[in-house]
Amino acid sequence: MPVFARARAKLPKSPAKWRSGLEAALTVSDIAASAAPLPEAVQAMVQAATSMLGAEHCSIMLLEDDGVTLVLVASYGLPTEVEIGHTLRVGESIAGRVLVTGKPLLLGEVDHDAFENFVPKSRRISSSIVVPLRVHGRAIGVLSLATSAPATSFDEDDLRLGQMFADQAAALIYRAKLHEEAEHRSSDLLALVEASKGLLGALDVESLLQSVLDGGTRLAGSSEGFVALFDSDSASISRGVFRGFDKEQIRSLLDHDEVVRAIENVDIAIFRAERGLDSPTTAAVGLRTGDGTRGVLVLMADPELIDDRRHLLKAFGQQCNTAIGAAELHTEMERKESEVSSIIQSIPNPIILVDAHGKLAGINPAAEQIFGISGSFSGGTEITGALGNEEVERLLTGKGDLQTEVIAGNPARTYKARVRDVRVPGAPMGRVLVMDDVTTERDAAQTQRDFVAMIGHELRTPLTIIKGFARTMLRRIGSVSSDDIGEALRTIDGRANQLERLIEDLLYVSKIETREASLRIEQVDIQQLAATVAKDIIEDHVGREVLLDIPPGLVWACDETKVGLILRHLIDNGLKYSDAPAPVVVRASDEGDELRLDVIDKGIGIVSSDIPGIFERFRQVDGSATRSHGGTGVGLYLCAQLARMHDGEIWVDSTWGKGSSFGFSLPRRAITSDVVRITSSEDAGINRGA
């Protein structure tokens, strides 16, 4: 029963031929069942055909894949010079013509001169049979049998029997070739899979290039080669892995026309490069990623293997392109992620990111410090309850763009919190919270409001008194005694002086902050200066006393007016915040390189938590507008700035309930007049004790 559909061959008439045909068919079945390699199977069929028809010569020639060449694959009785692998052109010789026509031939004595490329025989042939090996109606080869003895000439039954045998042999050969091709392709695919294993999941470019070279050399049956990627600007090698090549050889190969063509066309080129190696065949596979990165894989290849695996190397090159492109993309993403992370980590503003499920996705150090959590340990937890601040948590779990002010941190500070949705095309990704510290601005705004209230109060008090006395005198101008007039004028003059000093303080502050204040340095008698200031101030503090502990004749180079202003504020504060009969002491001493002055009282003192900010602008321990002692909050700030104008320092040492000691120092300097630039008040040092 035929395996493949084909035209039924004419059957032999002789019972003996039938028996021979059946025996031959069984022989072919046995050969098929043996699963012998194709060359051995074909040779066994030649032996069976020779025995079946009693031939002296027998051969099988198969058609090559090119469709124009017949090649001898098995023979019996041919001269030794006719070796396996002998070829004929289709259409030439008897076998070539039978293949073309597809019809069997029964020939008598053959004139070999009549056929081009006739396969020579040891003796003249008296009879021969030439039949096509047919599968699916297509000839895949030729079976030839011949005899030299006239007594054993072939007949029509022999021709039919030979065709029957050829058809069965063709089916076996066809199946065997299909099996070999399937095994070959399976082997090739397995080789491709093995070569590509290293490409899977590799995202580090350097490691990936090593895997590319390993896989390429495995496919090419060699151990030498190199893979290189080129810089897009300079076209020089930016990255590469090399094995068995020196720099000169690499340069020579990269300049080779075939390699250049493979790179330009992203193709494979196989050529010979003379390097004095046993395997001079070279394969070059052009590489190019989706981002346009060019490269090449160059391999020293096994000549017997590389032609069959050309298509595998090209497929491997395409896989390499994809893998390298993915690794480059991963590297770029890591770089950008690192840049973004570095920026976020370095931003002083607190930043919190939650995902679409309301879980903590990221937090920078500033936010970690405020909320007291660690991003590395808290990542992925529900944001609700994680921060310990319900208002901020509501913002992060809400919807849409939100903005408000929140109080957070320890110590508590005021932040402007802004929340926005983070989206990728087509889907929400989460929400991000950014907080701006506005504590300073809010404190400054509150300070300005307090200052306006204080300055209004301080200005209104003397003006009210001046206005009251002036109106009283105007209403009673004819009946007021001279003593009353004198008392009223003294009161008006005192309050006017108070108002003048207040305005002068504010003007000094303005000049200092606009960098317009200057120093007039001269030799000043410190004892006399302190006495003058104390006498002026004590008139407003009836029943109080100021003691001067200053060596007589102590002269120092400084600005008399500005040092006097410092002493006036410190002495006035000492008298305000202490009670009689305790005096305020002014002490001065020459420390060699600097003059030290201290104003000491036995008053109520200052709470330690209030000391750090006591020299700031508009700052008062009692900040209410109704406080008992009055003041604008610029006195100590002005003292600190005037001390710094002299390159000196100012400090305070105080204990609550026991009194305070305010001191400042003036460095020794030459007598000159210069303009001193003043920096921000934060630089005013409070770093010494009395």
Image (cartoon, rainbow, N blue to C red):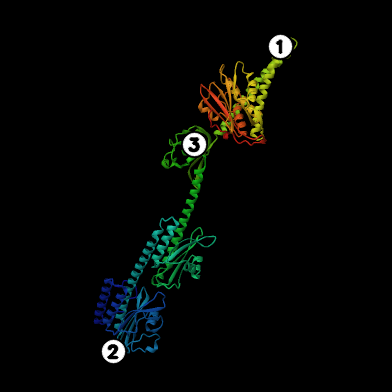
Please tell me how crowded label 2 is: few (under 14), some (14-19), or many (20+) other residues with Cα within 10 Å.
some
Badge 2 amino acid: Ala
Please tell me how crowded label 1 is: few (under 14), some (14-19), or many (20+) other residues with Cα within 10 Å.
few
Res. 149 mark: 2
Residue drawn at (47%, 41%), measured in percent from left and top?
A: 365
Q: Earlier in the sequence, mark 1 or mark 2?
A: 2
Q: Position of residue 177 (x, y in %)?
A: 34, 72
| Relative height, residue 168 to residue 447 (above, below) | below
| Relative height, residue 570 to residue 204 (above, below) | above
Residue on which the image places disc 1 = 483
- The residues bearing labels 1 and 2 have C-alpha atoms spaced at a distance of 176 Å
| Relative height, residue 181 to residue 558 (above, below) | below
Q: Nearer the viewer, residue 173 or 267?
A: 267
Q: Quadrant of residue 241?
A: bottom left
Residue drawn at (54%, 61%), measured in percent from left and top?
A: 234
Please identify the quadrant where the C terminus is shown. top right
Please tell me how crowded label 3 is: few (under 14), some (14-19), or many (20+) other residues with Cα within 10 Å.
many
Q: Earlier in the sequence, mark 2 or mark 3?
A: 2
Q: Nearer the viewer, residue 114 or 334?
A: 334
Instruction: Find out whether the residues at labels 2 and 3 contact each other: C-beta distance under 8 Å.
Output: no
Work out whether residue 119 can be spotted.
yes
Of all residues, the one furthest to the right in this rendering is 478
User: Nearer the observer, disc 2 or disc 3?
Assistant: 3
Q: Nearer the viewer, residue 37 or 453?
A: 453
Residue on which the image places disc 3 = 395
Q: Earlier in the sequence, mark 1 or mark 3?
A: 3
